Amino acid sequence: MMNRQTRILRGAAATLLAAAGLLAEGAPAAAQSLLASRGLGYVNPPVDGRARGLGGAALALPGGGLSLVNPAAISALPAPAITMAFQPDFYTSALPGQDTDGTTARFPLLNAVFPFGTRWTFSAGFGSYLDQTWAVETADTLSLPGREVAVTDRFASRGGVTRIRGGAAYSFTERLSVGVGADLYTGSVRDTLSRRFAATDTVSGRGDLVGASYSTEWSYRALGASLGVRWVPSDALNLAASVSAAGTLEGRPAEDDSLSVGRDYSLPLTFDVGASGRVTPNALVVLNAQWAGWSAANEDLARVGGARDAWMVAGGVELGNTTAGVRSFPLRVGARYATLPFRWGPESAGAAFPDEKALTAGLGARLAGGAAQVDLGGERGWRGGGDSVLDESYWRMTLSLTLLGR
């Protein structure tokens, strides 16, 4: 029986690996994007609801912040603080002759900050990095001696890579500070391949048809570091820059899995720059740009389409009084354009790299003298385009709560 099940699963694997490239009709997926199935997954920055409402621009916001983008930003926080973000999203994907949709929810950010004296600030937290949660399901009919059997094959991947950071920032003056972060990239992904037969084909007397499943689990780990600077040349202007570097992401199968071989992937060097300017007492303009050298992993991912350097520009406008200690309800609008790092399919098949565009809006609340901050950011976005074959639209919400120990 075990040999028969193994043959069944190996046959299903060939079918599903082909189907994963096309994402056959009716394929359900619990993911934030079908692009989670490409390369190393879908890159999801660890930012809060305020930044999401501003197009994703988190780098140079007045008053600092707890997003894991600029390790120097925590120096602007006046008291111990903790933030947590919750992020549900919904997407619809279209491929030639096929449509699918899905939804999921995650916690992309948790960070705590602890000032020490008048110059030092320390932080500890984690944030999202690479999402690899997706699924594909196909229905087929097998011709067996004397009968035909309905069968459903499913390949599901669940997990991803998270960034855990310990950071410190030092303030030279109230207007100039630097920050460093030590990053641990870690996570696991569980792949499950299963085959189910229709109930009418597994009744008494036909017990030779037994559904089966096979799972493998991978663990990932890498070390990295981040460096950032925050400069406030005037009360109306904030400037910031950061660089993040990581070494090799080591992917290793479970110890008892003798059928899989470990793989290593080069992670990118990433540069971020940003500025924000207060054009009126109640109007703030924010701009950010990012470049990530994902082409370092091109050779590692050559068999699945490769990787390219990716860049992003984002910006927005915040309306409302955000002065510390003042109760307010700021409004935000923004936009973002990004090139995504992983090709949709093999280059030999003519597949292209996808892009992402998004329009954003948000609402904040500064309560209890600024000790409680609630931020909601909403996004309407589109991925794919050009020769990437995939066209995907999505709605994504990010709700964050920040508490300061005043």
Image (cartoon, rainbow, N blue to C red):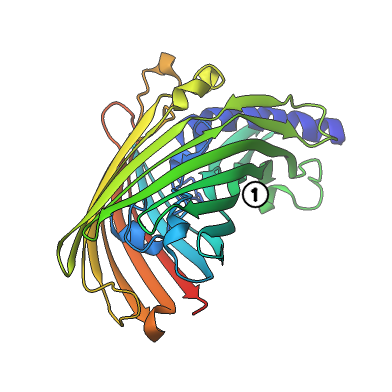
Q: Residue at x 53, y 27 (%)?
A: 18
User: Foreground: 103 or 44?
Assistant: 44
Look at the image and tell me in which quarter the N terminus lies.
top right
Q: Which residue is mark 1?
A: 198
Q: Residue at x 50, y 49 (%)?
A: 29
Residue 247 in the image: above or below residue 191: above
Quarter of the figure with residue 22: top left
User: Foreground: 259 or 247?
Assistant: 247
Residue 231 in the image: above or below residue 53: above
The residue furthest top is 348
Can residue 25 be spotted in the picture?
A: no
Q: How many marks?
A: 1
User: Foreground: 152 or 311?
Assistant: 311
The residue furthest left is 280
Q: Is residue 163 left or right of residue 330?
A: right
Question: Residue 105, position in %: x, y?
Answer: 50, 60
Can residue 399 be spotted in the picture?
A: yes
Say which element carries label 1.
loop
